[in-house]
């Protein structure tokens, strides 16, 4: 069924505007981190210690900032250490995501917060993709430190925006979705476009809770960028589009994006916004391993995992154990073991070299099963196209 084309100019944008107090939000965060004195000022290093978690070590020659005090930090003789993890957002994260995003886009944040249930359903349906970068608390819990949102939008809406950009376009896209006239593609529509002419990706927003002076900000942003790239690699991307406050937009313009329009500040706001785009052809002059060029690299998948199999593999790549996987998916351990066998068989049939010299897979709890799992997950890290919706021809789709 064809998607109705909606006149963007006919869509009113009447949204309450507010900017929540970030200080109040910070007071709820109580990450305990140790500070120490080092001969190297502001030295920062990142150590990857798992698929989904990063340990950030910083040496900072300064007294605690006001923000770090409200986070519950203490000054000791040890290095600053905090665990940072990245994961995909869930429907239950909708309220926290909307609140944090309101600091950089009050209009979108207010609209999402006032329609929390529908916003959560859009996340659950994967119409809106969300990423959550979290800081670990002393009690082992996790608090949201940064969040980003994106969506694939249809070609007609993309061409309309390129021809005549409008301010606050992310909020307009959300408002259309809330009223049932969405420009967001469903997973099945993404699969058809991914195997056809390609996809248009719009970054709906990004925000973080730390101050620019915080020594935690560099590792937080490093983890956020890495997670964004890993979640959006492997698609046949035609265009990358976004709209950001002018100070943030400067960073993306320096990275190769092209400005389409500059918008004046909204009432009550200090800075204007910038609409930007990058197309596949514009990535050619850029450094081959830059995040932008990595997003536009594409090779068709070979295996053809089902949506439920892709869900298992996505969670496994986030570092979940089989027990956590079964709990997250609300299935029995036996059903999960059977699913792993099907996944291994499918991968072995389509791409046997993944497993090297290993023999036929055994159950996922056995030694060989664990080894095959390790091989498969490494292959998927290197070949993310295998985890993206894609309409493989039936004759090439493995059983």
Image: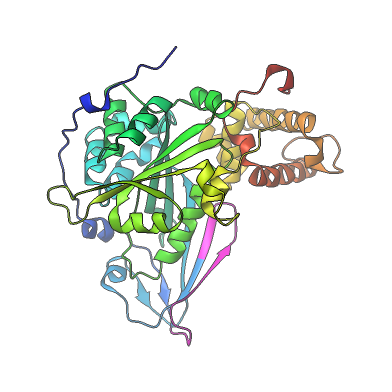
- Residue 104 at x, y percent in the picture: 27, 51
84 or 276: nearer the viewer: 276
Instruction: Tell me if residue 248 comes above or below residue 93 in the rendering.
Output: below
Residue under the image location 30 percent in, 38 percent down: 165
Total numbered badges shown on the rendered structure:
0
Residue under the image location 25 percent in, 60 percent down: 27
Instruction: Tell me if residue 346 comes above or below residue 37 in the rendering.
Output: above
- Is residue 44 among the parts visible in the rendering? yes
Q: Is residue 109 magenta?
A: no
Most distant residue in the bottom direction = 39
Looking at the figure, which quarter contains the C terminus? Answer: top right
Coloured how? rainbow
- Residue 272 at x, y percent in the picture: 22, 52
Q: Is residue 42 magenta?
A: yes
Residue under the image location 54 percent in, 54 percent down: 286
71 or 100: nearer the viewer: 100
Quadrant in the rendering for residue 49: bottom right
Quadrant in the rendering for residue 386: top right
| Residue range corresponding to the magenta coloring | 37-55
- Is residue 208 among the parts visible in the rendering? no
């Amino acid at each position: 069924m064809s998607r109705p084309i909606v006149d963007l100019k006919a869509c009113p944008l009447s949204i309450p505007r507010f900017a929540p107090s970030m200080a109040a939000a910070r007071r709820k965060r109580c990450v305990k981190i140790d500070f120490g004195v080092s001969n190297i000022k502001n030295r920062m290093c990142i150590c990857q210690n798992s698929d989904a978690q990063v340990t950030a070590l910083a040496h900072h020659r300064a007294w605690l900032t006001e923000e770090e005090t409200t986070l519950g930090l203490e000054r000791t003789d040890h290095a600053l250490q905090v665990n940072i993890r990245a994961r995909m957002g869930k429907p239950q994260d909708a309220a926290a995501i909307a609140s944090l995003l309101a600091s950089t886009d009050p209009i979108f944040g207010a609209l999402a917060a006032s329609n929390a249930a529908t916003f959560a359903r859009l996340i659950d349906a994967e119409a809106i993709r969300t990423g959550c970068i979290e800081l670990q608390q002393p009690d082992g819990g996790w608090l949201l430190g940064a969040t980003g949102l994106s969506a694939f939008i249809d070609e007609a809406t993309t061409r309309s925006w390129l021809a005549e950009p409008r301010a606050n376009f992310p909020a307009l896209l959300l408002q259309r979705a809330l009223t049932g006239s969405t420009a967001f593609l469903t997973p099945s529509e993404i699969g058809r476009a991914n195997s056809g002419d390609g996809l248009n990706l719009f970054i709906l927003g990004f925000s973080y809770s730390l101050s620019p002076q915080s020594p935690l900000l560099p590792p937080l942003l490093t983890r956020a960028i890495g997670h964004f790239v890993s979640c959006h690699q492997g698609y046949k991307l035609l265009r990358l589009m976004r709209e950001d406050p002018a100070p943030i937009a400067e960073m993306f313009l320096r990275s190769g994006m092209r400005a389409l329009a500059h918008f004046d500040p909204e009432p009550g706001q200090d800075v204007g916004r910038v609409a930007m785009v990058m197309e596949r052809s514009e990535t050619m002059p850029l450094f081959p391993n830059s995040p932008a060029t990595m997003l536009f690299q594409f090779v068709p998948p070979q295996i053809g995992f089902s949506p439920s199999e892709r869900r298992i593999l996505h969670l496994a790549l986030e570092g979940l154990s089989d027990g956590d996987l079964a709990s997250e998916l609300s299935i029995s351990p036996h059903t999960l073991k059977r699913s792993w066998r099907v996944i291994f068989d499918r991968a072995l049939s389509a791409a046997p070299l993944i497993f090297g010299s290993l023999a036929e897979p055994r159950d996922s709890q056995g030694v060989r099963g664990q080894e095959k799992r390790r091989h498969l997950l490494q292959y998927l890290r290197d070949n993310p196209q295998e985890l993206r919706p894609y309409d493989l021809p039936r004759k090439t789709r493995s059983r």
